[in-house]
Amino acid sequence: MRSIMRLGKRVKILSSLLIVAAGSLVLQSSSHREAPLISNDPLADNTDLYAFRSPDKPNTITILANYIPAELPYGGPNYNTFGENIRYEIHIDNNTATPNDDIIYRFTFKRVNEDPSTFFNIQLGKLNVKATYTCERSTDGGKSFTTIMRKGPVPPTNIGPRSIDGPVGLNAGSYENVMSAAIKTASTGEKIYCGPIDDPFYVDLGGIFDLGDAPRQNAKPRDGLGHYNVHTIALQIDISTLQKNHKSVAEAKNILDPDYVIGIWASASRKRVSTLGKYYGGRKYDDESERKYDDDDDDKDSEWVQVSRLGMPLTNEAVIPIGRKDYWNRLTPYQDLTNIGIFGNYFYNPELGLYMDDTKFGAAVPAFSPLRIQRNSLGAFGFGNGQNGLYGLKGNPALAGTALDDAIFGTLLLPAANSPRSVDLWPIFHTGVPNLKPYQLATGKNGNPLAAGKPFINNFLPNGGDMLRLNMAVPPTPRNHPKFSNEGIISAAVLGLTDPAYNSTKDLQWIPNMDGFPNGRRLEDDVTKIELQAVSGVALAAIGLWYDDYNGTGSPVTQQLLNVITYNTGVNGNDAPFTSSFPYAAKPWRGTDAQQ
């Protein structure tokens, strides 16, 4: 009888099984809809990842992993929330001596319809759909997991005042109260918030994807993500939990201590095969809330498949070409180095570099005219696509003791001829930047870019993968500091090169914004501008490989360098102010107020 019931179950759901089995191929594919296949699965789509030292609690690190792109605040009656049957994970690598991840936070979500009789999402204190989460933590690279939070609350969408504030809805008084009530502390001490927020990423999507028209030449720039929401998984974690030897930040040797570097990436995974229908274990359930799984559940042994990942912002959007984006999403960062033959050249010779080079297609993108790559830096080194960069120095005694020495990291950073950006763009995305020659500011180098200079970054974690890398020892820049800047490390470099408070010595000292992108990523950081400036070679200039109009005399702060430093995309900040406490993001836009 039981076998007949099982057969009946399978026959009844056969069509759904075939559809989803096919769909599992489609889902094997972060950022905002950037890959063809994951754009069809928004609940599992990573949009952005942030990691920074908490400004008000500097003994902690805050991580936000955002999902579900471009949520309309007024998108009723079916508002977005986290999906069931998805594993959302935040991965942390803190030790190159151990393979793969060292710490993993895994989140799974459940939904309940509290009042299926109404089409309203919230009515008289009941939520449709009400979501809760379970958080598990692994400290052995995923071999075992411990549950650290059960039934964590997910706030509803910020629908409007009657639904949230007043007695006919939640009677919460304000959405700030709803968010505050949803911040919980795990059994292991982490603060957690899972729920909707204003999308903190700001960019003129319309201009950028209109063949690089940013800033727009004949129209007003517009934040393409303004007044949209996302869902975030936010964690605030003590630094001693994340540091590989569980040391507190007070024990760091200095503010660039390499033992405090971590790598962070986020992912979403789905079952390879799922079944749909109302037949479970041979029984038909009319009410989905009564559904129960038995030993015959077809999903039980199905393999989990990663469908989305995100480390550095804009990697898959603006570096990986469209034909490789889905494959990129299936890989982990630990597979990137073994796939360098497939993906490496997109970083060594980035497509965007073609539009910042007048010998290529620079004239075709007038918005990028301030951004021009060094083709003859110091009269000897060319970093345009197809040039050799610093590879001509391979084997030169001048590289001894530098990060470009084959005996140190030269095989990673100077792998081959005709790979000019292997020395800057590739490490920014794949290894981080070490506090070794030549990766120090030109301050104190006396014109020799290979000499020791002023340290300003060390987030080197050479595991070969695309991650956000953060040195947790670097102090946070107060958001009200007069020199706080959303230009991150570029701002720190400019100060270290030009400000008398910092350029009179090449000794290590704290410079404002050393905690900014790409040393982690703060909510405020203008990553689109920073990455476009990086493609144009600003990091090379910072270490003394000046732009072509520098003739070796006078100030190296030439017009070309000034053009790059002053470039902006036309969208220079978020559409809502950030807050001063965890999770720091602005509250989600209200459906009755938001305008597009």
Image (cartoon, helix red, strand yellow):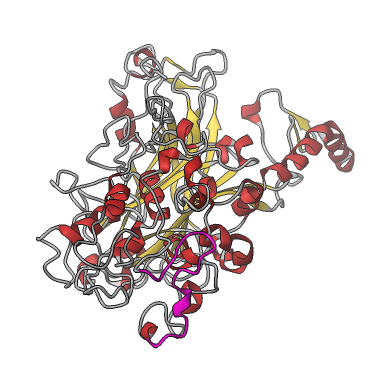
Vertical placement of residue 589 versus 475, above or below: above
Magenta span includes 384 = yes
Q: Quadrant of residue 167?
A: top left
Q: Nearer the viewer, residue 108 or 99?
A: 99
Q: Is residue 446 left or right of residue 596?
A: left
Q: Magenta stretch: residue 512 in it?
A: no
Q: Name the residue located 35 percent from the left edge and 51 percent from the top edge.
A: 521
Location of residue 295 in the rendering, given as x and y in whole percent from the top left corner: 73, 47
Give the residue displayed 20% in from the left and 52% down from the top.
477
Q: Quadrant of the C terminus?
A: top left
Front one among 475 and 126: 475
Relative depth, front residue between 275 and 495 = 495
Please report the bounds of the magenta region as a residue range.
Answer: 379-397
Q: Measured from the top left, where is residue 558 in percent x and y?
A: 25, 55
In the image, 487 versus 550, the foreground residue is: 550
Answer left or right for 28 relative to 67: right
Residue 76 location in percent, x, y?
51, 18
The residue that appears at 23% across and 74% down in the rendered structure is: 445
On the picture, is 4 further left or further right than 269?
right
Image quadrant containing the N terminus = top right
